[in-house]
Amino acid sequence: HYPLSDYSPNRHLIIPLWFRILYSCGLRISEALNLTYEDVDLEKGTLFIRNTKFGKERIVPMARSLIERCLIYQENLDSNKVINNFFFPSPYGGRYSESTIYKLFRKILWEVGISHTGKGPRVHDIRHTFSVHCLKKWVLNGEDLTNLLPYLSAYLGHVDLRGTQHYLRLTAD
């Protein structure tokens, strides 16, 4: 239920889907912001992630419910393809900046009554939440984390397992 904006006529469509993709797919902020129409394959239900933090590329699957939301979103912004190739276009051309997203996130937190300190919550914490929820689900299902951790590492685009093992500390319960 993101409000309409006089400054950005599509923001009420962009921001909710952007945050859903961030959480549902465990993307980094820049990875979601850099998505173009060519990167979003709604027939296959995948996102092609390029120009990542470590210069890697990967294909990330989406849940059916997220694909359906993307289809509705794309119908509403279809005319945008000609003007701006970014899947989440800025009203001023190009894509939203990370600082703009951070400001919008802080505004959302304020409006729903969640305090924000210099330590968080941060937009990047959504990626951490995705990772911890994934690991916790595996534990509750009796899965062997030793075997599955490399899959999560590849999915997140980590260079090696050390970056992914960090999340194990956050799943102590």
Image: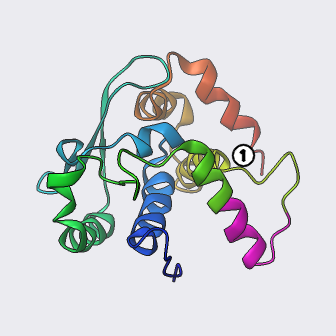
- The quadrant in which residue 35 appears is top left
Q: Residue at x 45, y 56 (%)?
A: 24
Q: From the top left corner, tell me how far across and down residue 110 is, in percent.
A: 78, 71
**Residue 4 horizontal/vertical position (percent):** 48, 81
Q: Is residue 8 magenta?
A: no
Indicate yes or no whether the magenta region holds residue 112. yes
Q: Amino acid at mark 1?
A: Thr
Dominant secondary structure, magenta? helix
Instruction: State which region is magenta.
Output: 105-115
Q: Tell which of 28 and 161 is nearer to you.
A: 28
Q: Please tell me which residue lies in front, 19 or 26.
A: 19
Residue picked out by circle 1 = 171
In x, y percent, where is residue 66?
33, 65
Color scheme of the displayed model: rainbow
Query: At 72% from the left edge and 46% from the top edge, which residue is drawn?
Result: 171
Q: Residue at x 52, y 44 (%)?
A: 97
Q: Position of residue 46 (x, y in %)?
A: 24, 47
Q: Residue at x 47, y 29 (%)?
A: 147
As rendered, which of 143 and 23 lies closer to the eye?
23
